[in-house]
Image (tube, rainbow, N blue to C red):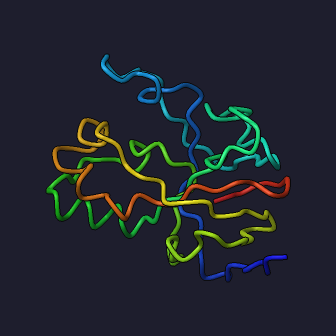
Amino acid sequence: MIPTLTLLASDTVQLLTRSPAHNFFGHHGGPAGEAAVEVVDALECIAGRGVRGDRFFDYRPDYKGQITFFALETFVQLQRELGSPLARPEATRRNVFTRGIDLASLVGSEFELQGVRFFGTEECRPCYWMDQALGPGANDWLRGRGGLRARILSDGWLRQ
C-alpha cells in the first residue's frame, strides 16, 4: 500500500476549470475546436471516472488523466519569459491550478487535497497546440513543466 501524502493548508487551489468538449485532442491535422473552458468555483471528482462535466469524464476505464493539475507559479513564469502577458491559465486546459505544490514530486504517489484522494500518474506533457493557445514557444518552454495527470481515487469536491 502506498502511503497517502496529505497536502498542507498552505498548498492552495487558485483556479478550477473544466472543458466540456475537446479543442485539441482528436483535431490533429485540422483546426482547433472552439469550445470554451469553464472557470468554476468547485469541481466534482468521481473516483475512477474523472471530473463531472469535463471532456475526459468516463473517457476510458482507469484513464491516467482523469484530472490535471498545473502550478500557477509556472504559468506566471511562462508569461514573463515568453512575453505573453495576455495568455490566460485556462488556455492550458488543465483542471486545477495550484500554488505552493511541487507537482512533479507527486508522480507515482498517492496524495490528498481537500479530502479527495488522487494518484499522480505522470507529467501532463504539453503538445504543439500550446503554441497556438498560449503563444509561440510555449510547447518547448513547457516541456518538463506541463503539470500533473492523476487518477481520482475517492469521490469529493475541490473548491477555490
Looking at the figure, which quarter contains the N terminus?
Answer: bottom right
Q: Residue at x 23, y 54 (%)?
A: 140
**How many numbered callouts?**
0
Q: Residue at x 81, y 46 (%)?
A: 46
- The front one of 34 and 68 is 68
Q: Position of residue 150 (x, y in %)?
A: 64, 56
Q: Residue at x 41, y 29 (%)?
A: 24
Q: Is residue 100 left or right of residue 24?
A: right
Q: Dividing the picture into quarters, in which one does residue 33 lie?
A: top left
Q: Position of residue 113 (x, y in %)?
A: 71, 69
Looking at the figure, which quarter contains the C terminus?
Answer: bottom right
Task: Report the residue that reaches farthest toward the top.
Answer: 30
Q: Is residue 134 left or right of residue 37?
A: left
Q: Is residue 25 left or right of residue 136?
A: right
148 is higher (above) or lower (below) than 39:
below
Q: Residue at x 85, y 53 (%)?
A: 155
Q: Position of residue 123 (x, y in %)?
A: 49, 60
Q: Dividing the picture into quarters, in which one does residue 73 lie?
A: bottom left
- The front one of 135 and 108 is 108
Q: Position of residue 151 (x, y in %)?
A: 70, 54
